[in-house]
Image (spheres, rainbow, N blue to C red):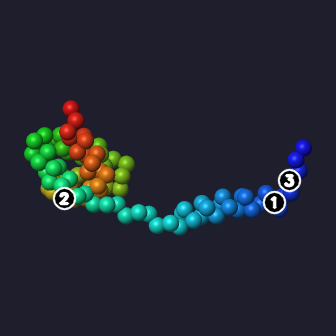
């Protein structure tokens, strides 16, 4: 049988809580904007697939992110510039797919 002194167990618990506190203090990484090539490709894709399909794909891609869905009077270029690099990649995949 192993006997553990409580003074030995306490530092391990403290290490776990200290690590959690450090993670909370760490600043979040800023999202990267889409590249010029992504914006250009998305602009041409929108012309090919149509506005309705773009709207549904855009709203699906941004769901669950900090990006707001496309507004009713918002132009396509404005909506595309609000995307992040990762969201633009997902949108390209959604529009190119079947």
Element at badge 2? Answer: helix
Q: Camera-side residue: 43 or 65? A: 43
Counting residues from the N terminus, which is met first, the one under dot 2 or under dot 1?
Answer: 1
* Alpha carbons under labels 3 and 1: distance apart: 7 Å
Could you say where residue 42 lies in the image, as x and y percent from the top left?
17, 49
Residue at 31% in and 61% down: 32
Q: Is residue 49 above or below residue 87?
A: above
Q: Is 64 left or right of 57, judged from the image as shown?
A: right
Instruction: Identify whether 34 is placed above or below 52.
Output: below
Please identify the residue farthest to the top as the structure is shown: 98
Q: Which mark is residue 36?
A: 2
Q: Nearer the viewer, residue 74 or 45?
A: 45
Q: Position of residue 27 (x, y in %)?
A: 46, 67
Give the secondary structure at mark 3: loop
Badges 3 and 1: C-beta atoms under 8 Å apart?
yes
- Whether residue 74 is visible, yes or no, is no
Residue at x 19%, y 59% (from the top left corner): 36
Name the residue tied to disc 3: 4
User: Which residue is found at the position 61% from the left and 61% from the top?
Assistant: 19
Q: Quadrant of residue 22?
A: bottom right
Q: Residues within 10 Å of mark 2 (few under 14, many from 20)?
A: few
The quadrant in which residue 56 appears is top left
List the residue tagged with mark 1.
Answer: 8
Local crowd size for mark 1, using a 10 Å CA cut-off: few (<14), some (14–19), many (≥20): few
Q: Is residue 44 visible?
A: yes
In what quadrant of the picture does the C terminus appear? top left
Taking 1 as reference, is 38 above or below it?
Answer: below
Residue at the far left: name it.
Answer: 47
Task: Of the two numbered discs 2 and 3 on the same chain, state the one appearing first in sequence.
Answer: 3
User: Gap in Å between the C-alphas at discs 2 and 3?
Assistant: 60 Å
């Amino acid at each position: 049988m192993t006997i553990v002194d409580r003074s030995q167990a306490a530092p391990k618990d403290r290490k776990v809580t200290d690590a959690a506190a450090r993670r909370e203090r760490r600043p979040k990484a800023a999202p990267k904007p889409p590249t010029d090539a992504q914006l250009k490709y998305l602009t041409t894709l929108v012309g090919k697939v149509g506005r309705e399909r773009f709207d549904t794909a855009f709203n699906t891609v941004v769901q669950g992110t900090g990006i707001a869905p496309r507004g009713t009077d918002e132009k396509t270029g404005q909506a595309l510039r609000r995307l992040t690099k990762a969201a633009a990649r997902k949108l390209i995949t959604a529009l190119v797919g079947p």
